[in-house]
Image: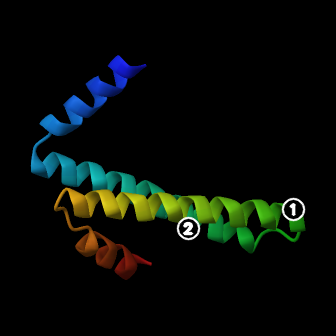
Amino acid sequence: MRLQLSNIFSVWNKKSEPDKREEFERRCSELTNRLEDIRACFDMTEDNDAIDALIFEENAVMSRLALLYKQAREEGISLEHFERERRKQI
C-alpha cells in the first residue's frame, strides 16, 4: 500500500499547474453537484431517518469541499473564479 500511495503522490507532483487546476476544478464540480443532489433530496422525503442521513452526507461533502479548497490554496491555486461561475449557473 505504501508503494502505491507514493506512486500516486509522485504522479500528482509531476502534474503541470494547469493540470492540477483542472483536477481541482473537476473534483470541486463533482462535490458541488453531489451537494446539489443531496439538497434536492431534502424536498423529496419526509422520513426522519432519511433526513438525518442526508444531513450527515451533506456535512461530509461540505467537509470534503473545505479540504479541497485548503489543498488548492496550499498549491497556490485559486478556485474562487470557478465557484463564482458555478453560482451564476444556479
Point 26% across, 59% down: residue: 72
Which scheme is used to colour this image of the protein?
rainbow
Residue reaching furthest to the front = 2
Number of numbered labels in the structure image: 2
Among the two numbered marks 1 and 2 on one chain, the one whose residue lies closer to the N terminus? 2
Point 44% across, 54% down: residue: 30
Point 21% across, 68% down: residue: 78
On screen, residue 81 above or below 26: below
What kind of residue is marked 2?
Glu
- x, y percentage for residue 12? 22, 37
Q: Residues within 10 Å of mark 1 (few under 14, many from 20)?
A: few
Q: Nearer the viewer, mark 1 or mark 2?
A: 1
In contact (CB < 8 Å): disc 1 and disc 2: no
- x, y percentage for residue 85? 30, 75
On screen, residue 29 above or below 36: above
User: In the image, which disc is placed on residue 49?
Assistant: 1
- Classify mark 1: helix, strand or loop: helix
**Observer-nearest residue: 48 or 90?**
48
Left or right relative to 71: residue 52: right
Which residue position holds label 2? Answer: 36
- x, y percentage for residue 25? 30, 57
